[in-house]
Amino acid sequence: MTQNTNPNRRTFLKAAGAGGAFLLAGCVGNEGEPTDESTPEPAPQQAGLDPAQSVDTDRIAADPRDIPDPVDWDEPRHHEIEIATTEEIAEVEPGVTFQYMTFGGQVPGPMVRVREGDTINLTLTNESESAMPHNIDFHATYGPGGGADDTTIGPGESATIEFQAMYPGIHVYHCAVPNMDHHISAGMFGAILVEPEDGLPEVDHEFYFGQHELYTEGQAGEEGHHGFDFDSMRAEDPTYVCLNGEAYAFTGNGYGPMTVDKGDTVRVFFASGGPNLTSSVHPIGNVMSRYYRDGDLLSEPDRNIETAPVAPGTVAAWEMETPVPGPIKIVDHALSRVVRKGMMGVIEVEGELEPDIYNPDP
């Protein structure tokens, strides 16, 4: 998919305070279109910020729909999986570039999906164009560093490990070199789903999102190339809090929302890459009817959860029903991250009104 060049996206992002309030209507306000009076001044320009660089990829944000099919086998299998680490420049938002580090050229990295008892033969390759060493730590792995000790490789190198997925759940994987906070912030995290032997309940749609922070030398909305800022990372004060690597990627001002039909069931896998902030994840206009806390797929799920903490280094999952049409806004309820730093995506439910359940004009 090519980069969305709708100029309204830049207007929206540079007026994040008003735009955020409009998009959050029903949770923190009921404003209509932002007015000139409600639009804050753009972020001041910082001296010395380099111009935006040419991009290596038009889109860094992983497609939330790009998930392996559910497990449909009932005996252990052997999987050959190859993942490449990349370093590439892409846009956080229009006019703002950043040097990402990724698994598979996307943020979050590709989801791995297997069954309890399966064996994974994993080959990690660090592309020759990289400038840094990388590795991979699977939280679903018994072994030194979750495999990181034996997959630490320089540019142009590869390493292979094999492990058995012995405990079911939905788990994070991430780069774990000494500067792991930098590498994770820049995009190096993903999820591995180990389904229980009996599988998961069937749903109509599954989506895969990942929240993480970007610490940059610029301010949110400031055009130019944003270098990495280690001081703001030490202070845990990010410039952006992103969903799948970009600001507001899955809204009408980005690549568009995910769409489902009224009455469909939805499962969300939500990876909190961090490296530092705990997400207070919340679906505006819906509820997590079955919530798999901390990726626990064996215990009875929690019911009808409105907001839940997802610590960095954790993947949560939840299911939702969609009895009425309209947007379900996936946000971090630390709301300044939504209004000012980019942390929101939308699942749009399409269909006829159900006035017995929700009547917008009684």
Image: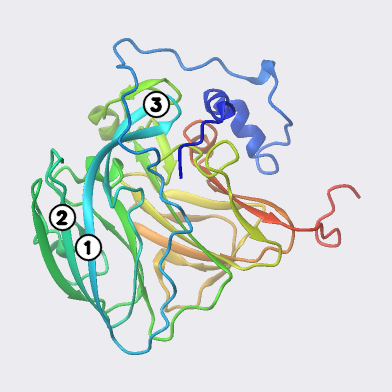
Q: Earlier in the sequence, mark 1 or mark 2?
A: 1
Q: Which residue is mark 3?
A: 96
Residue 253 drawn at (x, y percent): 57, 36
In front: label 3 or label 2: 2
Residue farthest top in this picture: 47
Query: Can you tell which mark lies on residue 3?
Result: none
Residues tagged 1 and 3 counted as in contact (Cβ below 8 A): no
Q: Residue 86, relative to residue 236: is it above or below?
A: below
Q: Is residue 14 left or right of residue 23?
A: left
Q: Earlier in the sequence, mark 3 or mark 2?
A: 3
Question: Which of the 4 image quadrants contains residue 99?
Answer: top left
Query: Can you tell which mark lies on residue 82?
Result: 1
Disc 2 residue type (three-letter): Thr
Q: Residue 112, relative to residue 216: is it above or below?
A: below
Residue farthest front in this picture: 2
Q: Which residue is mark 2?
A: 125
